[in-house]
Image (cartoon, rainbow, N blue to C red):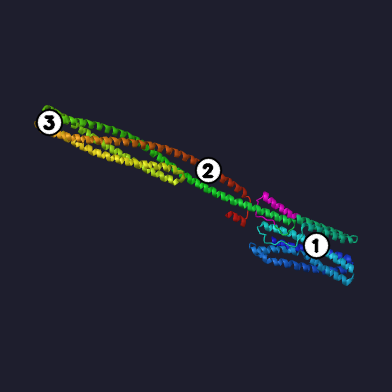
């Protein structure tokens, strides 16, 4: 496409020189010199021969020099720069028409000198040659300007960079072009006016030439303005390609306007690139915050689950503590009964001792008293066994309390671990869990001490039972051996004394057991109260966690809304096509 355009441009420039410029020069020369027909034919053959030879040299020198570049790949930066610089050659060398006409005019002047040697005619021939040469050189210049700008717009549309192409230093501004056009038209009209009465054809030729000059001057300006308008419409209504730049080859008024337009597009491209980088950073931060919110929600759910477990365990502990409290109250009642029975046993032992003292006086009374002692011993034995069984049950209850304390300690440790995983949010609950653990340890220690006391009491009760059973056996022997009442009563007196001492000891142990039981009741009551407080605190913490979960969900919803708005912004600015220039890449890396 570009190769054909250069070809036709070179052909057009040479045709202008051969078809229009040389005939007009011959016309004015003939008017000055008043040549005969053979002389005109002779001079025309010489002039056209020179013109054809110069056109052929001009055409092939430029066209053949571009063949090697056209065969190479234009993607190469060096080749592209050389090729774009080559495109300017027809524009620069469009002045060859002036050179051709000056050479041909020199031939005509030499011909006139040889024929007439008239100075004023030579001067008119020289002036005519210069004016006609300037006129058609300016037409060639306008054609080159139109061709070059058209070609540059197409290359820019194909994505070629025009930054490395140097601007043409020898050019005319729009104002200078207009001044030069009117000056040449005036000079050409002046020359034609000198011979207007002799030949009407000169008027027609001048009219066509001046009309063509004015038309080309206007078109060379309007064409570039039209291209600027098309590019502006593409930005406002089309695909908004911000990589497009207006080619600036000629630094005239339109060229400077194009440079300002290119700077504006470059600033806009940098702005859009900055928006792209900022939206990308916002999306990444939103994703990071959303991910953190999800992790926080997961942690809160784990804490909530742990709190619910702790609350459930505290509720169970409270229930079991109430049950233990009731059982210990029963144990306290039994212990009070044992104490009362021990007092009765002491009284009975005293009565037995008195009976033994007076047994010598009344054998029948002694026998009856022995029977009462026997009966009392049986009752005491039954009561002692019952007390032993109750003591065993009390030990089982204490074991249950110990197990509950261990479970409470484990739950408190688990709660403290979960609270530590949460960090700042679980610090308050960690304090509560630590207090529960300390109380559980204290409860276990109290249960251990009570267990030791109960075991000691059980051993004493067993000993009492054995003694009571021994007393019953002695009473049975005394009843059977009434005739040996004296010896027997002495032995009974000793035995009763011993039993009284042991009963006093059992009574003291029972009192201590009663006191320990009261302490155990207070401890269990305190544990039940703490368990209730723990359950209430767990419910409050669970409610706070639910509120925090709701706040986190609202934050996640806000982040999703922000991400959606950023995506909408990206959709809006994605209509602009931007290049990967260093400034945009630098901002994107930031």
Which circle marks residue 136 in the picture?
1
Residue drawn at 47 percent across, 39 percent down: 544
Q: Is residue 272 left or right of residue 194?
A: left
Closer to viewer: mark 3 or mark 2:
3
How far across and how far down the image is residue 102, in percent? 81, 67
Instruction: Please identify the dominant SS of the magenta region.
Output: helix
Q: Label 3: few (<14), some or many (≥20) within 10 Å?
A: many
Does dot 3 land on a helix, a strand or a loop? helix
Residue mark closest to the camera, 1 vs 3? 3
Magenta part of the chain: 222-246
Magenta includes 195? no
Mark 1 or 3, nearer chain start? 1
- x, y percent for residue 283: 56, 49
Residue pointed to by mark 2? 555
Where residue 166 appears, x then y in whole percent?
70, 62
Badge 2 marks a residue whose secondary structure is: helix
Q: Which residue is mark 3?
A: 479
Look at the picture and state if 209 lies above or below 283.
Answer: below
**486 or 14, which is in the foreground?**
486
């Amino acid at each position: 496409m570009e190769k054909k355009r250069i070809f036709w441009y070179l052909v057009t420039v040479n045709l202008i020189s051969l078809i229009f410029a040389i005939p007009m020069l011959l016309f004015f020369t003939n008017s000055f010199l008043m040549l005969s027909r053979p002389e005109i034919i002779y001079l025309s053959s010489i002039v056209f021969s020179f013109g054809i030879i110069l056109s052929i040299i001009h055409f092939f020198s430029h066209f053949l020099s571009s063949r090697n570049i056209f065969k190479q790949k234009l993607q190469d930066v060096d080749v592209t720069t050389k090729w774009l610089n080559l495109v300017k050659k027809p524009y620069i060398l469009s002045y060859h028409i002036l050179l051709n006409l000056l050479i041909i005019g020199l031939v005509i002047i030499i011909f006139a000198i040889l024929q007439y040697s008239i100075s004023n005619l030579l001067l008119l021939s020289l002036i005519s040659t210069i004016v006609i040469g300037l006129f058609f050189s300016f037409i060639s210049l306008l054609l080159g300007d139109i061709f070059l700008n058209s070609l540059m717009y197409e290359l820019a549309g194909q994505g070629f960079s025009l930054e490395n192409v140097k601007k043409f230093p020898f050019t005319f501004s729009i104002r200078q072009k207009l001044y030069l056009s009117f000056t040449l038209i005036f000079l050409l009209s002046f020359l034609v006016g000198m011979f207007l009465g002799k030949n009407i054809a000169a008027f027609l030729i001048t009219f066509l030439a001046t009309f063509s000059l004015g038309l080309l001057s206007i078109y060379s300006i309007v064409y570039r303005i039209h291209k600027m308008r098309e590019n502006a419409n593409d930005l406002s209504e089309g695909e908004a390609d911000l990589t497009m730049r207006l080619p600036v080859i000629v630094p005239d008024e339109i060229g400077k306007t194009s440079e300002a337009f290119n700077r504006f597009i470059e600033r806009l491209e940098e702005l859009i690139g900055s928006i792209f980088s900022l939206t990308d950073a916002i999306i990444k931060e939103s994703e990071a915050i959303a991910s953190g919110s999800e992790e926080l929600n997961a942690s809160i759910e784990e804490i909530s689950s742990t709190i619910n477990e702790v609350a459930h365990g505290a509720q169970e502990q409270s229930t079991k503590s109430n049950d233990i409290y009731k059982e210990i109250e029963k144990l306290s009642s039994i212990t009070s009964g044992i104490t009362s029975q021990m007092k009765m046993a002491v009284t009975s032992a005293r009565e037995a001792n008195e009976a033994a003292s007076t047994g010598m006086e009344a054998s029948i009374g002694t026998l009856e008293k022995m029977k009462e002692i026997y009966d009392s011993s049986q009752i005491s034995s039954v009561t002692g066994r019952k007390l032993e069984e109750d003591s065993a049950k009390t030990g089982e209850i204490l074991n249950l309390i110990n197990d509950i304390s261990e479970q409470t300690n484990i739950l408190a440790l688990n709660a403290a671990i979960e609270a530590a995983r949460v960090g700042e949010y679980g610090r308050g609950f960690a304090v509560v869990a630590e207090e529960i653990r300390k109380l559980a340890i204290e409860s276990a220690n109290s249960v251990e001490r009570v267990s030791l006391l109960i075991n000691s009491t059980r051993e004493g009760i067993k000993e009492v039972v054995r003694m009571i059973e021994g007393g019953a056996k002695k009473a049975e022997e005394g009843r059977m051996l009434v005739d040996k009442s004296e010896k027997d009563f002495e032995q009974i007196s000793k035995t009763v004394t011993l039993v009284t001492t042991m009963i006093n000891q059992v009574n003291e142990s029972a009192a201590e057991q009663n006191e320990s039981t009261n302490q155990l009741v207070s401890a269990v009551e305190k544990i039940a109260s703490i368990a209730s407080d723990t359950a209430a605190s767990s419910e409050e913490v669970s409610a706070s966690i639910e509120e925090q979960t709701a706040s986190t969900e609202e934050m996640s919803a806000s982040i999703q809304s922000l991400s959606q708005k950023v995506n909408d912004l990206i959709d809006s600015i994605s209509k602009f096509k931007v290049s990967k220039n260093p400034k945009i890449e630098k901002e994107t890396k930031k």
